[in-house]
């Protein structure tokens, strides 16, 4: 393996809403940092399309769980740039206003890049860039409870809004579009409970350590 192949490593993490994608990504970044592998997370949630052209009430009913809600063209452009060693200006999505924030943030290239989101393993061009692909699954009850907690505490939603979204878009879109992408993964993690499966995390960290050795 030549030095160029060791410059960057792109891990794609997909799974249903509330499955633990972001938590797993953060844990991998933390553990890899302990062994000198600096990484960053690029969340596809920040690449939802801007909805400034819609009134706020219309934005609230927008189907954010459909793959077309993601600006995959911009996400792909930014991922390619990071892999090529270039900095990007990443949009930050405002989930209380249901559109992009005004100020992007600068993200600089790192050895490890983790792309996480519902549709990380859905878009063919993104799939081709991933060096390793992971699908995280969890039971419906666990996933729904995590989603409700996040939407209320972090995104300013009401219990009524969250319940409506789960029933009308989250669950149907998962079955139709997200779940089938599990077949594109190199490795699947079934995560129930509060703790991340330690064996899975340790195995992934070892793989990354060996890659950059």
Image (cartoon, rainbow, N blue to C red):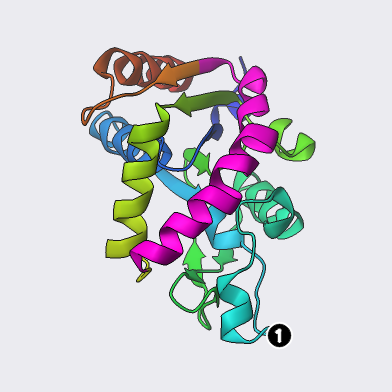
Which contiguous range is marked in magenta? 158-187
Per the picture, the main secondary structure of the magenta-coloured stretch is helix
- Position of 49 relative to 30 (above/below): below
Q: Quadrant of the N terminus?
A: top right
136 displayed left or right of 181: left
Mark 1: give few (<14), some (14-19) or many (20+) Cα within 10 Å.
few
The quarter of the picture where residue 186 lies is: top right
- At 27% from the left and 31% from the top, the residue drawn is 31
Tally of numbered tags: 1
- At 78% from the left and 38% from the top, the residue drawn is 125
Q: Position of residue 22 (x, y in %)?
A: 39, 43
Q: Quadrant of the C terminus?
A: top left
174 displayed left or right of 151: right
Residue 154 seen: no
- At 64% from the left and 60% from the top, the residue drawn is 63
163 magenta-colored: yes
Pick the residue in front: 159 or 101: 159
Q: Position of residue 67 (x, y in %)?
A: 70, 49
- Position of 44 relative to 193 (above/below): below
56 magenta-colored: no
Which residue is under mark 1? 53
Pick the residue in front: 27 or 139: 139
Q: Position of residue 124 (x, y in %)?
A: 78, 35
The quarter of the picture where residue 161 lies is: bottom left
Q: Secondary structure at mark 1?
A: loop
Q: Position of residue 43 (x, y in %)?
A: 50, 51
Residue 200 seen: yes
- At 35% from the left and 68% from the top, the residue drawn is 158
Pick the residue in front: 113 or 65: 65
- Position of 171 relative to 134 (above/below): below
């Amino acid at each position: 393996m030549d030095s160029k192949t060791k410059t960057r490593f792109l891990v794609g993490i997909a799974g249903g809403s509330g499955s633990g994608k972001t938590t797993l990504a953060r844990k991998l970044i933390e553990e890899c940092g302990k062994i000198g592998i600096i990484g960053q997370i690029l969340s596809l949630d920040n690449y939802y399309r801007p909805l400034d052209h819609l009134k706020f009430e219309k934005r609230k009913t927008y189907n954010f769980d459909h793959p077309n809600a993601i600006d995959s063209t911009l996400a792909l452009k930014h991922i390619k740039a990071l892999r090529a060693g270039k900095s990007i200006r990443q949009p930050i999505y405002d989930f209380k206003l249901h559109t992009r924030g005004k100020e992007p943030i600068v993200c600089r290239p790192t050895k490890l890049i983790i792309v996480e989101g519902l549709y990380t393993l859905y878009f063919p061009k993104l799939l081709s860039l991933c060096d390793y692909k992971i699908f995280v699954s969890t039971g419906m009850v666990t996933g729904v409870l995590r989603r409700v907690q996040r939407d209320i505490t972090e995104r300013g939603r009401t219990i009524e809004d969250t319940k409506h979204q789960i029933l009308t878009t989250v669950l149907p879109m998962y079955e139709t579009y997200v779940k089938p992408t599990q077949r594109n993964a190199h490795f699947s993690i079934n995560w129930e409970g509060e703790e991340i499966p330690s064996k899975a995390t340790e195995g992934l960290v070892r793989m990354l350590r060996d890659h950059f050795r």
